[in-house]
Image (cartoon, coloured by chain):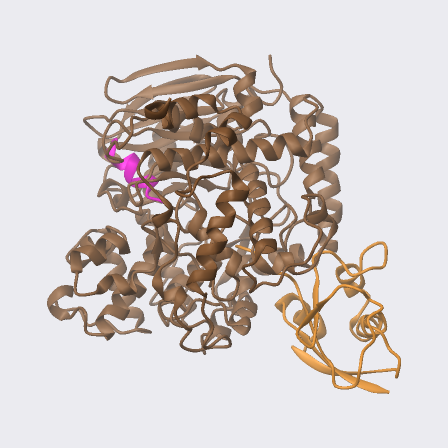
Chain colours: A orange, B brown
Amino acid sequence: MIRVRVKYIPEILQSVTRVSEEEVAVGENATLRDLIETIIHAHGEKLRAWLLSEKRELAENVLVIVNGEVVTKLERRLRDGDVVVVTIPFDGG
Amino acid sequence: MPYGFTGKWLRVDLSTGSIRVESVGEEVYREYLGGRGLVAYVLFRELKPRVDPLSPENKLIFATSVITGAPVPGVNRVVVGAKSPLTGTYCESEAGGYFAPELKYAGFDVVVVEGASEKPVYLWIRDGRAELRDASHLWGKLTKDATEEIKRELGEPLARVACIGPAGEKLVKFANIMFDHRYAAGRGGLGAVMGSKKLKAVVVRATKRSVQFYNEKRLVELAKWFYENWRKQLGAVSRSTYGTAELVAPLNRDGTLPTLNFRGGSFERADEISGEALNKTILVNRSTCFACSIKCKPDVRAKHPYETDPAYGGPEYETIAAFGSLCGVSDLGVIAYANQVCNAYGVDTISAGVAVAFALELFERGVISEKDTGGLKLRLGDPEALLRLLHMIVNREGFGDVLAEGVKRAAEIIGRGAEKYAVHVKGREVPMHEPRGKVGVGLAYALSPIGADHLQASHDPTFERVAEHLVALGITRPVNRLSLDYEKVRVVYYGMLWWSLLDCLGICKFTFTPHSAGVYTPNHLVEIVNAATGWQVSLWTLLKAGERALNLARAFNAREGFTSRDDTLPDRFFEEMEFGARKGQRIDRAEFERAIKLFYEIAGWDEEGRPKPAKLYELGLDYVVRELYSDKS
């Protein structure tokens, strides 16, 4: 198992996860897709429509940043100690 | 009868009291669509260069668009325009709510107000008829009191009222126009233009619908699609749950929450003014705009000693940051109260907050003292000082009379190096988005035809990943938020064309992607326009209309004497951020200037930022070429 640090930036996500960040354990060869499935499993199916598109890719209005780098491919492999930020590209308001 | 618009404009001359109905042909709507397009069309063609914005020669325009009134969420904002008394530039400002569809249903696409009345009046429009009525008894009244009294005396409780408060009457340079005392056409001082014309209010009521849409069934289907799908979008749910206050916490964490007059980007007590905090403390309800299910507007009730009336709405993100982190205040009750003062007296909350923060910093640095403020001690983070100063501004009392001119002119009046702390572009106070952490926003601030504005192009984080809705606009490569290279210039340019189009159509930028809260895509917009009008336009045609309006507004400014010198940012943004998550970050001035020059070339503007003849011809604006370049032809 490897452990990654997941940070939930939008308050709406925190209202579901109940935490602003947490450590999540995933398999040795886990991908970002595996991590998101783990998060959905832990915090509820409500997150599925928010985080994933109908084509089962990353939802268009979601921004995932792994160790400071924006990642759009769910096949991205994760490593022990990675920091994954889940947010939305907050626009003018 | 055309579809989507009535073809009727109301032209009101307050100097003579005459009211005329003009018929306008379809070709004008095809080229300009409405909103910004029509405002720029009227101002460029009808205003003489260099008129005093507060003189009878200025014109005040209320514009709808070819899709206003369609039973579709997010497409029903009213666009108000005039030459700005704050900046001297072209100006337009948009408000949500219900006024725009009511005006269209009452039979008019556009109202143009000219001249100035000798005594206070209001304009009463009902089902295709209009009259001017005495408003002497309403002069001096707060916006809600005036609105209620007008409805009572007309016996029209369902009328929609655009109204100025005492600040507009006193010509505060950033006075706004309040719609039903809670939706604001906030920026640029349009309320002062209305005040200079002695026009207290514009009131509309439609008891029948004077406009037809080509394919009502399709419009209803498109609305239904929105209602069924918005809950799947994380950003839309966030906005529905917290309103724009959702931005406080993430921007604070990111180091881009403007704090203490833009000295830093993180506020230590941001948790106390976040969306979650607002929901838990002062929120009593959420209101919405015509046909929209998102309901992002807060109604709040703050308690003693800052008791507020939910009928005035509540503070949204810009207001929360402007009176909160920017002034060092973390009491949501104070912020809600300040918001109410602004809505009741009728001033822009952004400019007011920036003006207060400017004064607080000047005092702290010893540039001004109690001698200037009439004995008032100012301190960052002091709620009482904030509210006292705000009251002085809206009433133009003492030092408030200086700040009521806006920070640019106030700094000139004060002297003593005060301009170093005046955060504005072209005289318009910078809104609550820190360009040192999203530099494309800085480009848009500098290039916007109305001065610093946060709704001219999508913000940089939107461009950090490629998504289908960006591909629809021709953006296929991700761009780093801190980059100022050619890719950034390109996406800001495309972003400005898209949002210019949305301002032509009177659209809420939160409901359309690319925006974090967006639900509809650019292609949905094409469907909405074609279903409303029966036209067969493409996204290309529509973006060209957005480009045409942007160029016309820029041409207006060029004719007024604005040049590339004005397309810049305040010095503060070229200096390092003093604290917060982005401490030490700054914009490189040379890099920024190169980006501006590249933008000009991409846009077809000359080295002074003026649209070139070839670009104007390409957009069908040959009359602008004749006007701008007459000395060379």
Residue B141 location, quadrant: top left
Counting labels gives: 0
Residue at (46% x, 63% y) in the render: B434
Answer whether residue B190 is magenta in the image.
yes
Q: Nearer the viewer, residue B444 or B207?
A: B444
Q: Quadrant of the N terminus of chain B?
A: top right
Residue B57 lies, with reference to residue B270, above or below; the image says: above
Q: Quadrant of the C terminus of chain B?
A: top left
Q: Position of residue B55 (x, y in %)?
A: 23, 31
B102 left or right, relative to B607? right
Q: Is residue B303 visible?
A: no
Q: Which residues are magenta?
A: B188-197
- Quick one: which residue is furthest to the front in this view? B632
Q: Position of residue B155 (x, y in %)?
A: 40, 28
Q: Nearer the viewer, residue B141 or B225?
A: B225
Residue at (23% x, 26% y) in the render: B117
